[in-house]
Amino acid sequence: KSHLSFQERSQLANCNKMAQKLFRLMSEKKSNLAVAADLTTKAEVLKLADAIGSEIVVLKTHVDIISDYDEDFVKQLKALSEKHKFLIFEDRKFADIGNTVKYQYQSGVYKISEWSDMVTVHAVAGPGIIDSFKDSVLQKECGLLMLAQMSSKGSLCVGEYTQQVVEMAKQNQDCVMGFICQERLSNMPEHFVLMTPGVQLNNTADTLGQQYNTPDYIVQEKSTDVIIVGRGIYQSQDPKSEAHKYRTIAWDSYEKRLSK
Ligand code: UP6
C-alpha cells in the first residue's frame, strides 16, 4: 500500500514531468477522478467536459469514436481543459511496432501528439514501442501509461506479463508516467501514477466482459491512485452531481489510506 501523499509523490516523480504535473494537480484540486467521455459526437463530449470539468483531474477520450471529429473539437477541448484545469488523456492503446506507432501517434486524422497530455501503450510488441515515442514525448511533455492489467474478464495481461510490463516501465521512467492497472503491486515504485478503469457504484459488470469495482475498494484496498469512470457518470441522470459523488468517495478513500 502507498501511504505517501500525492504531494510527496510529486517530488519523487521528478524523472517524469507529466506524472509530476498530475500528482500536483491532484493535491491542488483535491480530486483523483478521471472521467471516460465515451460519447460519439463532439457536442456531447464537450458538454460533458464543461459540466464535470471542475470535479476531475483527467478527461479520457477515444477520439476515433467521435463521428464528427475535427480540429475545432481539439481546440474547444483544450480551452475547457484550461478553464477547468484538467489534463487530456487519449486512450489510444497503441500496440504495433515502433515505426507504425510513431505515425499513428503523430499523423493521420487525429495527430494525437499535438494535443494529448497522456496516452496508453500496450507492451505486447516489446520495448521498441516506447522508443518510438521518446523524442515526441520528451519534447511535448506527454506521459505514457503502460497497460499492466485490464478490467475485462479473461484478460491476458496478468501474472508474468504484468511483471514484465512493470520492468519495462522502470527502464523508461522518463517516458512512462504510470500504469493502467487494477491494483498496486509490490514492485511498482511510488513515482508512477496508478490509474484504474472498471469503476462503478451501481453495476458489477456489463454484457461485453467489463467488470466493475467500487471506488472505495479500488483506492483503499487495491491502493491505486486515480479512478476512471465512464458510464457510471456520463449515463447518469445528472453527470455533474454523479461526478461530484465519485470524486468525494475517491478522495475520502485516498485520505483514509494515508491515515491508516
Ligand atoms: N478501459 C477499461 N478497462 C481497461 C482499460 N481501459 O474499461 O482495462 C477503458 C475503456 C473505457 C473506460 O476503453 O473507455 O476505460 C471504461 O468505461 P466504463 O466505465 O463505461 O466501463
Image: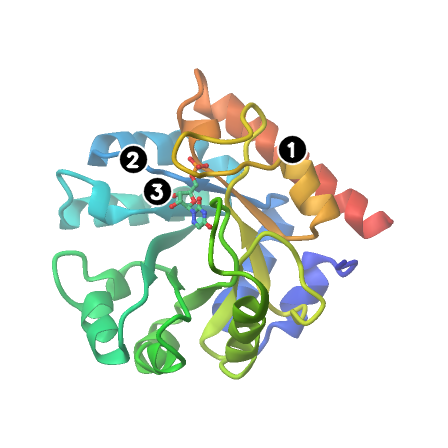
Q: Is the CB of mark 2 within 8 Å of ligand 1?
A: no
94, above or below 219, in the image: below
Residue hosting label 2: 46
| Marker disc for residue 147 | none
If you read the primary sequence from the N terminus, does the residue marked by circle 2 or circle 3 appear first?
2
* Total residue callouts: 3
Q: Is residue 216 visible?
A: yes
- Badge 2 marks a residue whose secondary structure is helix
- Amino acid type of disc 1? Thr
Query: Furthest residue to the front?
Result: 154
Query: Furthest residue to the right?
Result: 260
Q: What residue appears at the point 68 percent right and 46 percent down from the top-left corner? A: 219
- Amino acid type of disc 2? Leu
Nearer the observer, 52 or 132: 132
184, above or below 64, in the image: below
Residue hosting label 1: 248
Q: Position of residue 184 (x, y in %)?
A: 67, 59
Q: Position of residue 117 (x, y in %)?
A: 38, 60
| Marker disc for residue 80 | 3
Q: Is the CB of mark 1 within 8 Å of ligand 1?
A: no
